Image (tube, helix red, strand yellow):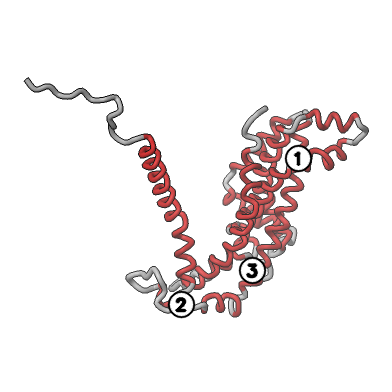
């Protein structure tokens, strides 16, 4: 009667450990590439469409590469559509809003983190409600106030309007970050004879640079992309921003898509540059207050 040889302990069963590791790495890379394609395709489409003629952007079927490569759309928006003015307006408003928002958030965040005072909880709840309140509902009241006080179609009107919905989030970020800085540092500075203001400027604020960077990036991006308030509070090209300018390229009967895409590509450049240079500060600042102790 025939007998089967017993299986040895060293006989392979399925994939080896190294094979499983390579398979897992391959799956992760495939998923990452898929997500990368999905994420970057809109940017690719913007750039490619901006290099087409207006006629080709309306052609069917769509083309994934221009039949005729041209920079006419960029020349059009800068030479005839005054897009450089819109860019400078958006930059002025975004930078000013960011500086003001970071300054207010730093001071108020430090105060909420370090001091106990009456109605502190109610004030923080109000800040949270202000952050979650739909901005579109504030457009009409802001328009009436800007019209009454002569702030319509001015930089100051846009900066004040933007600051109201940028500062609550920035305040929360700064408050949570200040709470992670040991109070002993403040106390040691006070024992050495420093005033509370000196302790804040010389000791606490330098330690909060990641949070300052995060709030600055959030404030700038929010102000740069704002559309509703910029549309309602501006009536001329004097302070009109790029978001309103891009929307103006969309007509009632036809849309010059190559101009829209060229303007969108140009308007994305400052955002990409800022994120690439300050992404570490952004992530550190956003996660700095997430862990206690």
Considering only order in the chain, which callout, 1 or 3, is on the residue closer to the N terminus? 3
**Who's the residue at 76% across and 40% down the image?**
207
Q: For the residue labelled by badge 1, is the local secondary structure a helix, a strand or a loop?
A: helix
Q: Which residue is mark 2?
A: 69
The residue mark sitting in front, 3 or 1, is 1
Viewport quadrant of the C terminus? top right
Q: For this rendering, which residue is in front, 275 or 110?
A: 275
Q: Is residue 290 left or right of residue 45?
A: right
Residue 212 placed where, x, y %?
A: 71, 46
Q: Which label is found at residue 207? A: 1
Residue 292 placed where, x, y %?
A: 65, 29
Q: Picture quarter containing residue 210?
A: top right
**Residue 27 visible (yes or no):** yes
**Who's the residue at 79% across and 38% down the image?**
204
Considering only order in the chain, which callout, 2 or 1, is on the residue closer to the N terminus? 2
Q: Which residue is mark 3?
A: 86
Marks 3 & 1, CB-CB < 8 Å contact? no
**Residue 140 visible (yes or no):** no
Considering only order in the chain, which callout, 3 or 2, is on the residue closer to the N terminus? 2
**Who's the residue at 47% across and 57% down the image?**
40
Q: For this rendering, which residue is in front, 16 or 171?
A: 16
Instruction: Give the class, few, some or many, for how many residues have Cα within 10 Å of label 2's Cα (few <14, many ≥20).
Output: few
């Amino acid at each position: 009667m025939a007998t089967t040889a017993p299986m040895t302990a060293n006989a392979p069963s399925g994939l080896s450990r190294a094979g499983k590791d390579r398979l897992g790495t391959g799956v992760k890379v495939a998923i990452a590439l898929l997500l990368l394609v999905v994420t970057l395709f809109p940017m690719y489409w913007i750039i490619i469409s901006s290099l087409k003629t207006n006629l080709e952007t309306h052609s069917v079927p769509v083309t994934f590469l221009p039949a005729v490569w041209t920079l006419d759309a960029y020349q059009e928006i800068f030479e005839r559509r005054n897009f450089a003015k819109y860019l400078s307006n958006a930059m002025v408003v975004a930078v000013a809003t960011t500086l003001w928002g970071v300054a207010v958030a730093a001071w108020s965040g430090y105060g909420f983190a370090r001091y106990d005072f009456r109605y502190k909880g109610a004030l923080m709840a109000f800040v949270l409600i202000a952050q979650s309140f739909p901005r579109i509902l504030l457009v009409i009241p802001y328009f009436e106030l800007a019209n009454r006080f002569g702030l319509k179609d001015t930089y100051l009107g846009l900066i004040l309007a933007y600051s109201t919905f940028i500062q609550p989030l920035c305040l929360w970020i700064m408050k949570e970050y200040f709470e992670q800085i040991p109070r002993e540092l403040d106390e040691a500075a006070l024992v050495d004879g420093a005033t509370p203001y000196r302790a804040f400027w010389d000791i606490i604020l330098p330690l909060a640079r990641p949070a300052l960077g995060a709030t600055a990036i959030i404030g700038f991006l929010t102000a740069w992309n704002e559309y509703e308030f910029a549309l309602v509070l501006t009536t001329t090209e004097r302070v009109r921003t790029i978001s309103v300018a891009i929307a103006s390229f969309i007509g009632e009967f036809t849309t010059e898509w190559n101009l829209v895409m060229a303007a969108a590509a140009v308007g994305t450049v400052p955002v990409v540059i800022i994120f690439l240079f300050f992404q570490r500060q952004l992530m550190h600042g956003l996660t700095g207050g997430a862990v206690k102790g």
